Every structure is written in C-alpha cells, then in structure tokens.
Image (cartoon, grey):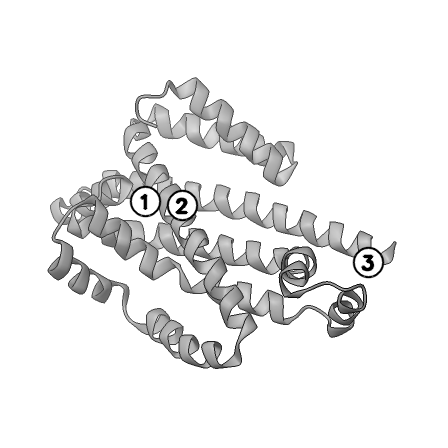
Amino acid sequence: LIATPWPIIIFVIAILAWLGARSIYVVMGSVVAFLLIGYFGMWQDTMKTLAIISVSTILCIAIGIPLGMWMAKSDRVQSIITPILDIMQTIPSFVYLIPVVMLLGIGKVPGLIAVCIYAIPPIVRLTNLGIRLVDRDVLEAAEAFGANYWQKLFGVQIPLALPNIFAGVNQTIMMALAMVVIAAMIGMAGLGQQVLRAVSNQYLAVGLMNGLAIVIIAIIFDRVSQKFGQRLQKHRENNNSN
C-alpha cells in the first residue's frame, strides 16, 4: 500500500465505499478524509494501519465464520466455546500482549496475532446467532425439497444470516482498530505507534492528529459496513414479501 500511488488508493477506496454503501455522501466523505490524512503527513502510517486492519479482518473472517458455523451445528460445541469467548472479551486488552511477547517476541507478526485474538469473538458469536435465528419453518421447507445439511447451510441459513454476519464483521473491524494503539507497544507500525510516541514524549498535537486519523478510518469502515448490512436486510425483506 505504501508503494502504491495515492490517487490509485483513493480511487479504490471510493469504489469500495460506493459498492458497500451506495451513498455519494459516504464516498465523498471517505475521499475528503483520506485527502486530509495525506495533507497532514500521515499517509504512510495510515496505509500501514489499513494493511494491518485488512489482514487481521480477513484472518478473523476466515477463522471466525467457520467456528460460528460449527457452534451453530452443535450445542455441545457452543457450550465449550462460549466460555472461551467470554474470557477473551473480558480480559483487559493489555493482557493479550503478555503471552504473545513471551512466545513470539516483539514485531509485526506478534502484534497482528494479538489484534486477531482480541477482535475475533464478535464475528464468531454473531455468525452462530445469525444461523440459529433462521426460522425453523424455512429449514423444514428446505428439507421437504430434499436439501441435505450442507445445502441447507449454504443455500438457506448463511444467506439469511448475512446481516448478522456483517454486523460481526463490523464489530471485528472496530475492535481491531481499538487494538492498534495497544499493539504498537510490541512493535506494530502505523498510526498506533505514532500515538504511543506522542504519549511518551507529551506531543499533544501529534497524538491528537494520529488519533483522529484512527477515528476517521473507524467511522468510514463503520458506515460502509453498516450501509451494506442494511441493504442486505432490505433485500432479504423484499424477497420474503415476494
């Protein structure tokens, strides 16, 4: 991302914002926000943070959704995993750094692992919840047409659970962004590292500017993912009414 010319990055961000939100206001807000970030000299750190958030979110989705599907399939698995998720969400975020540093040391990879561990519980919970909330009558209708377990899962349950799943993705992104500053304590680059340096050296302006950049990224991700989830919900309601 750092080596990519900034006009291309902003163009891609605008396209993704439009595909997700279908709102010209969200697109224009995203473009203006990233132009301001570049103008104030935070572009490289922002790109590092975006790369970290993107990779951690993809990893959380790749692990969390299958885990949520497994929980939805078995009450026993749910009873085992739910207390683990409870512990993960109640442990202070700083505590995640201790085992990661002891096992892997300091650097980007340990920081990424800490972010993933901290951010994964919402998507697991909401995937499980979304699948379990699918109407039993719909499942019985699918069974009446001869659908097996996998056909019901991918043809009925997952599509109907998508609004909940995307709500989980939204919360995962927000928690990953919240962990960025804390993960900077073990060497993760990006805006969080600049905030940490500003706090250590009492550079108020630098800390506020980089903190606001993190907030801007969080707002953009939040609005785009929320709008996309709302569109999925409306599409589902329209299909049900038809």
**Dot 2 and dot 3 residues touching (CB under 8 Å):** no
Residue 226, labelled with which disc? none
Choose top left, top right, bottom left or bottom right for residue 148. Answer: bottom right
Q: Which residue is mark 2?
A: 215
Q: Nearer the viewer, mark 2 or mark 3?
A: 3
**Which image quadrant: the C terminus?**
bottom right
Q: Earlier in the sequence, mark 2 or mark 3?
A: 2
Residue 38 location (% of width, % of height): 36, 25
The vertical placement of 4 against 82, above or below, is above
User: How many C-alpha atoms fall within 10 Å of the one at disc 3: few (<14), some, or many (≥20)?
Assistant: few
Kind of residue indicated by mark 1: Gly
Real-space Cα distance between discs 2 and 3?
37 Å
Left or right: where 241 falls relative to 64: right
Real-space Cα distance between discs 1 and 3?
43 Å
Residue at horizontal 63 percent and vertical 61 percent from the top = 153
Q: Which residue is mark 1?
A: 211
Residue 240, labelled with which disc? 3
Kind of residue indicated by mark 3: Asn
**Dot 1 and dot 2 residues touching (CB under 8 Å):** yes
Choose top left, top right, bottom left or bottom right for residue 142. Answer: bottom right
**Element type where label 3 sits in the image:** helix
